[in-house]
Image (cartoon, rainbow, N blue to C red):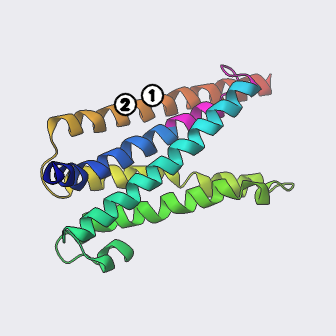
């Protein structure tokens, strides 16, 4: 039983981190939608967004710990982007994504510090680092280590589809708002 749990954690913790962080991105997009959600529902969506972010970072920490414990990478490679001797680009993308996700979480936690006049744009720009972090994590997960199992590839495809659809809907909504403001 312990061996099966170890095997699952070895290859599943990263997938769980990506799925949790993808869900975080989706709920973050939903939490900003004023057309579909009222203020109470947006607050609820923000709570789900934050909870999933914490879960995603927890799975990310577990993923890194397991990979170091199993000697699949070094602590240096986990801490210094592109320092892995075997797969510097792919492991480096994972390390970089991890740092970006932590930075995004910190900006979310201290959002009130950006609440002054004209400062919310800075917060938004910092918080949007979630998108390149998510992309880097996706490439890292699909191409590092063993070939992805069918269920993992399907999960990644669902992640890409979900975020792509949500971003398209948000983009179209913003275009409609901009057209309405010009009239």
Q: What residue would you read off at disc 1?
A: 165
Nearer to the camera, 33 or 112 = 112
Whether 174 is among the magenta residues is no
Q: Residue furthest top?
A: 36
Nearer to the camera, 104 or 139 = 104
Q: Is residue 15 above or below residue 81?
A: above
Name the image quarter holding residue 29.
Answer: top right
Q: Do the residues under discs 1 and 2 have CB atoms within 8 angstroms?
A: yes
Q: CA distance from mark 1 to mark 2?
A: 6 Å
Residue at the spot 12% in from the left edge and 49% down from the top edge:
147
Residue 93 seen from this side: no
Q: Position of residue 171 (x, y in %)?
A: 57, 32
The number of numbered discs placed on residues in the rendered structure image is 2
Residue at the spot 34% in from the left edge and 45% down from the top edge:
16
Q: Residue 161: which disc?
A: 2
Q: Position of residue 152 (x, y in %)?
A: 23, 39
Q: Is residue 43 above or below residue 179?
A: below
Q: Residues within 10 Å of mark 2 (few under 14, many from 20)?
A: few
Q: Position of residue 19 (x, y in %)?
A: 38, 41
Name the image quarter holding residue 154.
Answer: top left
Q: Residues within 10 Å of mark 1 (few under 14, many from 20)?
A: few
Residue at the spot 27% in from the left edge and 63% down from the top edge:
66
């Amino acid at each position: 039983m312990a061996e099966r749990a170890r095997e699952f954690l070895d290859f599943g913790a990263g997938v769980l981190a990506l799925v949790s962080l993808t869900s975080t991105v989706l709920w973050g997009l939903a939490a900003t939608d004023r057309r579909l959600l009222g203020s109470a529902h947006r607050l609820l969506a923000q709570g789900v967004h934050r909870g999933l972010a914490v879960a995603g970072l927890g799975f990310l920490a577990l993923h890194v710990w397991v990979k170091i414990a199993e000697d699949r990478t070094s602590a240096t490679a986990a801490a210094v982007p592109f320092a892995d001797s075997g797969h510097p680009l792919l492991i480096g993308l994972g390390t970089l994504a991890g740092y970006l996700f932590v930075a995004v979480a910190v900006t979310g936690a201290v959002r009130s510090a950006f609440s002054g006049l004209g400062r919310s744009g800075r917060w938004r720009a910092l918080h949007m680092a979630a998108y390149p972090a998510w992309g880097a994590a996706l490439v890292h997960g699909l191409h590092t280590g063993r070939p992805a199992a069918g269920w993992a590839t399907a999960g990644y495809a669902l992640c890409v589809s979900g975020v792509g659809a949500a971003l398209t809907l948000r983009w179209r909504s913003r275009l409609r708002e901009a057209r309405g403001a010009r009239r």
